[in-house]
Image: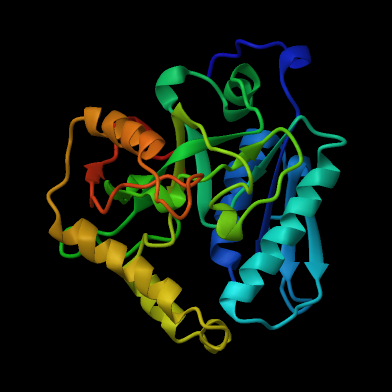
Amino acid sequence: MPNSLSDGNKKKVAVITMARNDDFFLTRWINYYGKELGEENCYIYLDGEDQPVPKNAGKVNVFHQKRVVQHVVSFEKTRLGFLSEVAKSLLDRYDLIIGVDADEFLVVDPKCGKTLVEYLSEIDIDPSVSGLGIDVGQVLGKEDQLDLDLPFLSQREYALVSSRYTKPSVISKPVNWGSGFHRIKGHNFKIDPNLFLFHFGSVDYKMIQDRFLDKDRMSTGREGHIKKRAKTIDIVTKTKAKTDEKWLRIARKLQTFFRPIYAWNKPSMAKWKLVVKIPDRFKGIV
């Protein structure tokens, strides 16, 4: 990719996450963010001292946190409170912090010809910026079970445009994230025209089914969360996808101006189930 910024003009960017029993996604997460930001700028907090360090961790900063077993709702508040404090401390050394889950990948549109760091260094972020949420699903009967050795976006072509994943992932100042990084308390959100947050939790039906067998997850009330992932696959499978990229621009505008009454600082699709074909230029990126 073209390098339009000198090193002196590039901002220093770190990425943080916290996960449990997610070695598969963490491996991909390290591969992607390690390449984009440098492994030494990646921070993983493992929920539980029993959690293995990913084999490809390299120079990634990996920390074990003592596990406190909580229902998913309580745990999310605790988790994001903790990660908000981590981000605040890292802002002493970094210009920007990206906060995402292990199955979320912030991607700059390849048409920009810029790396993620280059692009984030050029745009105004005060205090945060969001990418458009793209919930990638499997079209049953058309797309095969995931080949674990190949990139996600070489095997999946369709996604639900989801306000749930249009998150204020990138921050430039200390903030308090709400559960799941879905909002920043006391601040509005800004959706960038060239950033996308790809969510891969619904990327494979078999993988979702296997999660229902995970007693660790089920014991903390995550059944409903996993069912939402299966629902994405159902929607993507049954809905005719829009192929014109104008629908991505329309979705971005809708999410910018339509807000739930109960949460003015969260985007919404107004119950519209918009399924799109992912542009071919994204193939192989993740």
User: Taking 210 as reference, is 171 above or below it?
Assistant: above
Residue 123 at x, y = what percent? 59, 20
* Residue at 62% over, 67% down: 76
In the rendered structure, the answer to whether residue 76 lies left or right of residue 94 reads left
User: Taking 153 as reference, is 271 above or below it?
Assistant: below
* Residue at 73% over, 23% down: 11
User: Viewer-proximal residue, 94 or 191?
Assistant: 191
Residue 246 at x, y = what percent? 23, 27
In the rendered structure, the answer to whether residue 3 lies left or right of residue 223 reads right
Q: Disc count in the image?
A: 0
* Residue at 37% over, 62% down: 202
- Quick check: can you spot residue 59? no
* Residue at 48% over, 18% down: 113
User: Taking 282 as reference, is 142 above or below it?
Assistant: below
In the rendered structure, the answer to whether residue 82 lies left or right of residue 195 reads right
- Quick check: can you spot residue 141? yes
The image quadrant of residue 281 is top left
User: Viewer-proximal residue, 170 or 210?
Assistant: 170
Residue 16 at x, y = what percent? 70, 50
Residue 25 at x, y = what percent? 54, 60
In the rendered structure, the answer to whether residue 207 lies left or right of residue 86 reads left
